Amino acid sequence: MKNPRLLPDEKMLPPGVLWRDVFTISSNSFASVAAQYRTLDPEPVDPKDYDIPTGLVEIRDWMARHIRRVGPSFGEIRLEDHVVAPEVVLKERYATRIGYIRTLCALLKGAGYDADIVFAGDTADSSMAVLMRDMYEFPNVSRFFYALCRVKVKKGGFLWWGGETTTYFLGTENEYTPLGATAYDRSMFLDPATGGFGTIAASSGDLSDCEVETLSFSIRENGAVDIDFSLEQYGAAVGPARKRYAEMLPEIRSRHFQQMLGKIAQSASATRELVTDTEGYPFSLSFSAFVPAMAVVSGDAISFEVPQLAAHPFGVTGTVRELPIGVDGEETFETSRYRVVFPKGYTEVESLPESLEIRNPANPGELWSGTVVTLEVKDDVLSVDIVVTHHTRREAMLPAEYLAMLKEWNRLAGSKANSTIVVRRRGI
C-alpha cells in the first residue's frame, strides 16, 4: 500500500467492499458446503412415540413449549459437534439451534410431511451488490447460517396430480407466532438439496412484517386533549408481542402502561385501560388517555404539536463530507396515522405540516418514506389527517455530495414547524 492515510471519522458509512479497494481471497464453495449441510438432514421420528400430536402447528408449538435452546451458536463449534440425535434432544429437552431444527424436521417427517433443512441469511435489507458478491463472486458461506425447517404442504388435487403447494419456513419462533410468518421474509437462503439459492417468503401477503400505529387527538377549547391510541402488528412480530402480553404479570403490565402514557405526555392519565388482543390476527393493543393543556390556546388561536411526528431520518452531521454515505435498509413496512380534530368553529388554518416524499436519490422510483397531509371540514369541525409511511428497502450507498440533500430532508422532517398545526376560530 502506497501513501496510506487516516480516513476521516464520518458517520453512516456504507459496507467497505462497495467503496474501498478490497483484496479478497475465498477458497469456499457453496457446492461443497451444501454437501456437508446435507448430512444434517435427519431421519424421521414418529411423534406418536413421544405422545406428541401429529399436526404441523401442533408439532411446532410442542417444540416451542418443551425444548429449550442452549449451547454454542452455529459457528462456535464444528459442524459435526452440532449433530445430536433427535431422540436425545426429545429425552433431554434442550438443544442448540441446529439440534432444535433437526428435531423439528425429524418429527415433521415422521408425521408424513415433506420437510428438509435450509440455511437462511439475514439479508432482507442487505445491499444487492454486496449480497451478489458474497453469493457468486467471492463465496461467503458465513452469510447463510440460520437453520430453518422448510415444509411443503400440498392441498387439493388427486394423487400426485394438481393441487396447490404451500411452503412454510419454520425456525425457533414461539407458539404464539402465526403459521406462515417468518422473521426471514424476503431473505435469501442456501438450499443444501441443490447447492443453489432461493428467497424466503411468508406463506401469504398478509403475513409479511408490517406495523400500523394510529393516534387520534380530539382537542378541547381549553387546550386539553383526548387521545385514542392503537397499534397493529403483522407477520413474525406477532409471536413475541402475543407472548409478552399474554404472560405479563399484572403489576408489570400496570407499570408498562404508565410508561406508554409517559411517552405521549408526562401529564397523561388513562381514560380507558390498555386492551390487548393476544389471540386474533393481527396482534393489536389500544388505550385512551386525557392530557390537560396539551394544546396551546392563545386568544382565537390553537397551536398543537403532534407528538412523535418530528424525526431525523438520517444520522449525517457536519458541513463537509469526503466519504460515501451509507443508508441503512428497512425490513418492516411501517405506517403511522395521526388524526387531529379541533373544536367546532376552528376552521381557519394558519400553519400545517407539509406533505413530504423521501426517495432514493440514485433511483427516484424507489420511495423510502412519505408524509401525506389532508384536511376535512364537516359540520364546522376541522380534522387534519397525517399519514407517515416507511417502506422496506435495501441498504444503499450515496455519493458524498448528497450530504446537503440528506441534511435538508432532516431539517424538513425533524423541524418543529413541520409537526405543528396552528388554527384560528372562524370569524363571525
Image (spheres, helix red, strand yellow):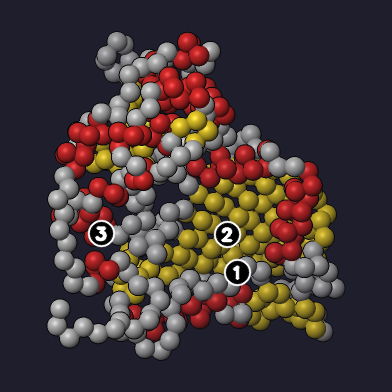
Label 1 sits on residue = 309
Q: Residue at x 70, y 64 (%)?
A: 263
Report helix, strand or loop for mark 1.
Answer: loop
Whichever of callouts 2 and 3 sits on the residue coming sooner in the sequence is 3
Q: CA distance from mark 2 to mark 3?
A: 31 Å
Residue at 79% x, 47% y is 251
Q: Residue at x 41, y 23 (%)?
A: 86
Which element carries disc 3, helix, strand or loop?
helix
Residue farthest bottom in this picture: 319
Q: Using the image as rendered, state which of residue 137 and residue 74 is in the foreground.
A: 74
Crowdedness of circle 3 by 10 Å Cα count: few (<14), some, many (20+)? some
N-term-proximal mark, 2 vs 1: 1
Report the mark closest to the observer, 1 or 3. 3
Type of amino acid at the residue the image marks with label 2: Ser
Name the amino acid type tagged 3.
Val
Residue 131 in sight: yes
**Contact check, label 2 and label 1, Cβ < 8 Å:** yes
Location of the C terminus (image quadrant)? bottom right
Circle 3 sits on which residue? 130
Badge 1 vs badge 3, beta-carbon distance below 8 Å: no
Tag 1: residue type? Leu
Q: Is residue 71 above or below residue 338?
A: above
* Residue 414 left/right relative to 72: right
Residue 297 figure quarter: bottom right
Q: Give the CA distance from mark 2 to mark 1.
A: 9 Å
- Report which residue position mark 2 lands on: 336
Between label 2 and label 3, give the one nearer the viewer. Answer: 3
**Residue 66 sits in quarter:** top right
| Residue 375 visible in this rendered orientation of the protein | no
Q: Earlier in the sequence, mark 1 or mark 3?
A: 3
Q: Position of residue 359 (x, y in %)?
A: 38, 68
